[in-house]
Amino acid sequence: MDPDLRRGSCVTAQQARIHELFVRHGSMSVVAREVGVSAIRVREALVQYERNRLRDQGVVPPTLREMMLGDVATRFGTLRTGIGGRPAKHARAAAGGAPRGPSAAPRGRVLPATASCRRFVVTTVVAGAEVHNGFWGNLKAFADWRGAELLVIRRGAVGLVGGADARLRALAETERVDIGGLVDVAADVRVPSRSMRPLDSLALPRSAAWTIVPHAAIQLETLPRLRSEGLRIRMTTGAATIPATRSRADQADGLGAVVVEVRDGVAHCRHVLATAEGDGAFHDLDVYVAAGVVAADHRVAAIVFGDVHHAHLDPGVAMATWGIRSDGRVVGRSLVDRLRPATMIFHDVCDFSARSHHDARDPHRRFALMTQGRDDVRDELRATADFLALTRRDGCASVVVPSNHDAALARWLREADFRLDPANAEFFLECSLALYRHMALGHGTDGVFERTLRALSPDGLADVRFLATGEGLEVAGVECGIHGHAAADGKRGSMQFFEGLGIRAVLGHSHRPTTRGGICSAGVCQPDLAYARGPVTAWAIGHVAVHHDGARQHLIYDGGRFHA
């Protein structure tokens, strides 16, 4: 028995013996075999020992349930080098003094921002799993090339990380990391390893602009927040270890890491992804990393833009995305010019705010539009056509996805009364006549938006493709032709519905950059639309890049940029 234990101590003889054996062997399994009980009983006895020692010192211990969540091994001073482990939820008593309570626990490492751009690459390794050496080697090469610091978070209390080299073992850590007060790498957060939706936990922190949770499943969510708070985004790291079990094909159980860039008080984070069955090659923006070699100036397969809503397009977003200045000129090196996508994909390219059905019974809104000179439907559609013409690039296809705001033109022709709208009566009748003549030839009502925009463009919007209703668009194995507003059989669409289809897709419509399972959703190009104003929002400006291997990256706009 511990010589420090005095007569009348709360610690029992069995607890003292188990503690003594554990300090000697450093393994609960070995102690369990020697004592003849299960490992969980050894763990419970160690926690009870610690609780009773606190009682001996006059300290009221936390509940048994709460203390069982911590890492017993770390609290009793067993070195975790080589086998790792979670940080202690409750620090053990310091020699000769009172123990530190949970509120006094250290915050973890703090990595301050610098005047120049500071970069990190964050990934997770899972105890008991094999490291994918190709992916790990590529991460090291990429980090060295970018001048980035590697942060490796370890998940799991017991077991070697197979195939790990010395650098990985030296880097693996379990403490929280604060990057410039902007990015919270929540290494001390415990989420069930088999969860495919690890970010759904209400207990996750949300104080930083970005919260990165170590977990193998790939997920990203923008959070509801006060507009004054700025961005609030959570994302998982992905893992550099090979998944032990295979899940459905649409679930993200491959390899992953997060690139973190901090510059001028703004952080940008994005996933880099690879397949577990492959050689570990991955893309980041226009960079391709394979076999430890980093090559720049690679094209992406596609960019799916956040919903455009052209009448309300943010000028900064237009400049950063397409290089479009406020005077309509295209200048500079924009995101599109850097990534050179083979396909550009547009959702809700027209807002149709001049005569939105939402405002049909709102005379105040109609009056405001009139006084601002924004109530002319022809002018709004012509401006939309000019925008599509202006954003075209040589060697790049422009594709317009059927969307609910674009379909508002057909609804207007179907439901409005031109006699009550003198400002738009002539254009209404022109469009109606064209539609009826088209129907007289045996065609349906689909395509009225496309035909109207082509008619308003000097060159008929050559090289711009409008998808028909129900027509798909597959890019690198990813479906990119679904807006997301409609589900099966006329019902409204949702992320949950499309997740259930078991497909890999990039949607629009929600205005919330999201990744869940095989589904990604792009953001919006203006987060302050009239019909959604208020103190709280979950929207964010963001596009999705689709790479030639089918990997996808959210590119979130903040501080006038999509990346540092």
Image (tube, rainbow, N blue to C red):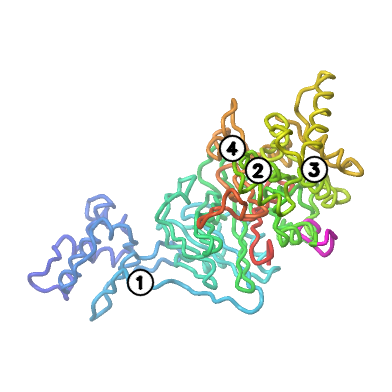
- How dense is the environment of label 1, judged by Cα within 10 Å: few (below 14), some, or many (20 and up)? few
Task: Name the outermost residue toward the right.
Answer: 459
Q: Is residue 546 visible?
A: no
Q: Amino acid at mark 2?
A: Val
The percent coordinates of residue 420 (x first, y second) are 70, 36
The percent coordinates of residue 156 (x first, y second) are 43, 56
Residue labelled with disc 1? 105
Say which of marks 3 and 2 sits in front.
3
Say which of marks 3 and 4 sits in front.
3
Which residues make up the magenta segment? 327-337
Q: Quadrant of residue 120?
A: bottom right
Say which of marks 2 and 1 sits in front.
2
Say which of marks 4 and 2 sits in front.
2
Residue nearest the observer in this picture, 232 or 162 = 232
- How dense is the environment of label 2, judged by Cα within 10 Å: few (below 14), some, or many (20 and up)? many
Residue nearest the observer in this picture, 26 or 499 = 499
Residue labelled with disc 4? 249
Residue labelled with disc 3? 378
Helix, strand or loop for disc 1: loop
Say if 244 sits above or below 258 in the image: above
Q: Amino acid at mark 4?
A: Ala
Q: Residue at x 71, y 68 (%)?
A: 145
Q: Amino acid at mark 1?
A: Ala
